[in-house]
Image: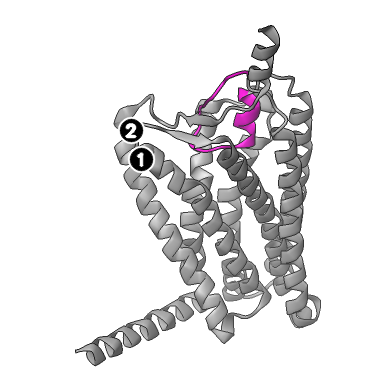
Amino acid sequence: MRGDNQSFLGDPPQEFILLGVSDRPWLELPLFVVLLVSYILAMLGNIAIILVSWLDPRLHSPMYIFLSHLSFLDLCYTTTTVPQMLVNMGSSRKTISYSGCMVQCAIFHWLGCTECILLAAMALDRYVAICEPLRYAVIMPRPLSQQLVAVAWLSGFGNSLVQVVLTVQLRFCGRQVLNNFFCEVPAMIKLSCADTAVNDATLSALVAFFVLVPLALILLSYGFIARTVLRIQSSRGRHKAFGTCSSHLGVVSLFYLPAIYMYLQPPSSYCQEQGKFISLFYSIITPTLNPFIYTLRNKNAKGALRSLLSRTWRFCRRRGSETC
């Protein structure tokens, strides 16, 4: 009997209960509405950026290649987590299968690390555009930007693979309740009843590499950019140069500040109550705001979006008149 119990406790649970805000039932309905509206806005905004980046010939530069991949990342981010959250908030049974939980962890961490490197590549692009404008086409050709995007995706996948391989080896001793809105590695480590020293150390090392190294490159790039911009004589030129960077800096801040708080602390000291709301912020609020930050601060993107909406409206009117 003792052996059977140990075997049972050592087996992974068939499903996890995602606590979310079920301990605060009054919060579920307003949060459901916020998530639903944010998800719709995130889908519309990011799809619009992807479409204009691919359809408008003026937006085929490396900057918009990076931006279209960032929008695709944000689409995947929200789709990986938000539908499950909406289903759970609208149901009394707030569960996710073990395999579904592992898949969610894998995709979420793949996308997160990919975005870290992609934001660094975008900072490099801005550095070349402002500090070496005459050699921009030579230093940052389209094939190089595509190679940097491929490196970002492959690096993120490698990190995710390591994290998931270690996570599936954790034992939970019958524990099933995750105090979170979705499955995330720090929450899984916190729930485990096994020795998680290897998981803690690996998570800290990989996060330090994938978060701090790209962040250092971003700060270094903007240090050179600031020095170059301050040397520009005309205030109009300085304003234009800062304007091309402000959108990217806003996105970097929205992404990195919560990520640093969440992951640059030992998983053993991870506070699930605070962590779940921070996770909620960068899994839905950040992807929702990103397309608006870029379109509101970018004349080319706004012009291309207006052109796309105008063509869509004319097409719909023509189809409507033909139907009548």
Q: Position of residue 19 (x, y in %)?
A: 45, 29
Which residue appears farthest toward the top when viewing the image?
A: 2
Viewport quadrant of the N terminus:
top right
Crowding at mark 2 (Cα within 10 Å: few <14, some 14-19, many 20+) = few
Residue corresponding to mark 1: 31
Horizontally, residue 43 falls left or right of residue 130, namely: left
56, 198: nearer the viewer: 198
Is disc 1 placed on a helix, strand or loop?
Answer: helix
311, 211: nearer the viewer: 311
Residue sitting at x 46%, y 75%: 302
Residue sitting at x 71%, y 59%: 153
Compared to 85, does 228 lie above or below? below
Q: Are marks 2 and 1 in contact (CB under 8 Å)?
A: yes
Q: Position of residue 147 (x, y in %)?
A: 77, 69
Q: Position of residue 275 (x, y in %)?
A: 55, 32
- Confirm whether the magenta stretch covers residue 186: yes
Residue corresponding to mark 2: 27
Type of amino acid at the residue the image marks with label 2: Leu
Compared to 264, does 301 lie above or below? below
Compared to 27, does 39 lie above or below? below
Residue sitting at x 33%, y 33%: 27
Q: Tell me where the magenta segment starts and ends, as one range.
A: 173-191
Which residue appears farthest toward the left when viewing the image?
A: 324
Type of amino acid at the residue the image marks with label 1: Leu
